[in-house]
Each structure stands twice: as C-alpha cells, then as structure tokens.
C-alpha cells in the first residue's frame, strides 16, 4: 500500500540533521521544547489542470517547532529557522526530495515566525510547499 504524501514529507524532514530528536509529528506538537510537527494548510490542491486529465498539484503545510522562549533562546530559534530554510533550499537544489511520485520541488514559502508563546516556550512556524505532477 502506498504511503500518504504527508507521511513521505514527514520522513523526508526527519532526515534533517538540524532536528534535535529527529522525530516529526503530523498535526500534533508536543508541549516540550525541540518538538516538531507538520500541519497541512487548507489550500487549493490543483495548481494547473493539464489537457490530458493530469495536473500540477501542491501541498501547503507548516513546519512547526516548539522551542524554549527567552531573549537568548529567541536568537537561537531564529537561527534554527534560517538554517532549516537553507537546508530545504540545498536539498531542493541537489534533487534530494520527498519520495512523492512526480515531485517538482519542496520549498519554504517564508522564514519562521512565532505563532504563539507562553512564559517559557514558543511555537515557531515555517510555511512550506511541495509541488508535484500527477498523471490522469
């Protein structure tokens, strides 16, 4: 049985050497620092319908990071977001992509920003996009 595309994206992101524990959840972030999740964003799936019935499609999602929150930690968190974005860009450039049939690219749509905070933790999100061609 074929794996779900979001599972293939999860497995790909788990290969990132920047992740502290290497484990990424889907639509769930643990309430402890260095927890990661990918959360699908509602969006139009089909970007371009082809005349043969196939299409160019997208999956939009947020890569979420639960991190410690303080003045010193915020600088580290910002650097992590920049480094992760750069890692994704490098993987895309060399063709190391999630194992999705017909995949065209993976990219970070924006750099990481804070979604919410408590007194000691923050959740950062990096919006991402995967684009792939699907045959009819």
Image: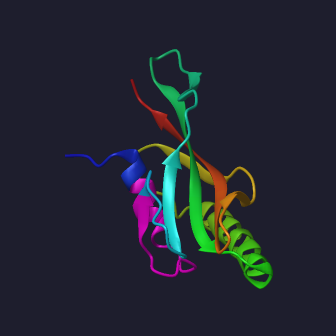
Residue lying farthest top? 51
Check the image and tell me how it is coloured.
Answer: rainbow
Residue 87 relative to residue 71: left or right: left
Q: Quadrant of residue 71?
A: bottom right
Residue 100 appears anywhere in the view? no
Q: Residue at x 45, y 69 (%)?
A: 14
Q: Nearer the viewer, residue 37 or 83?
A: 37
Where's the C terminus, which quadrant?
Answer: top left
Q: Which residues are magenta?
A: 8-25
Q: Is residue 7 above or below residue 119?
A: above
Magenta stretch containing residue 86, yes or no? no
Q: Nearer the viewer, residue 134 or 127?
A: 127
Q: Position of residue 8 (x, y in %)?
A: 39, 55
Q: Residue at x 55, y 76 (%)?
A: 33
Magenta stretch containing residue 10, yes or no? yes
Q: Residue at x 52, y 64 (%)?
A: 96
Q: Residue at x 50, y 66 (%)?
A: 36
Q: Is residue 125 above or below residue 136?
A: below
């Amino acid at each position: 049985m074929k794996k779900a595309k979001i599972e293939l994206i999860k497995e790909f992101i788990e290969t990132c050497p920047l992740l502290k524990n290497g484990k990424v959840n889907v639509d769930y972030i643990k309430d402890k620092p260095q927890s990661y999740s990918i959360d699908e964003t509602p969006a139009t799936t089909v970007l371009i319908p082809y005349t043969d019935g196939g299409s160019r499609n997208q999956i939009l999602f947020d890569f979420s990071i639960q991190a410690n929150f303080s003045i010193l930690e915020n600088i580290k968190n910002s650097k992590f977001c920049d480094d992760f974005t750069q890692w994704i860009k490098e993987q895309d450039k060399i063709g190391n992509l999630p194992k999705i049939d017909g995949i065209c690219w993976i990219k970070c749509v924006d750099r990481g920003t804070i979604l919410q905070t408590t007194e000691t933790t923050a959740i950062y999100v990096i919006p991402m996009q995967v684009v792939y061609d699907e045959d009819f």
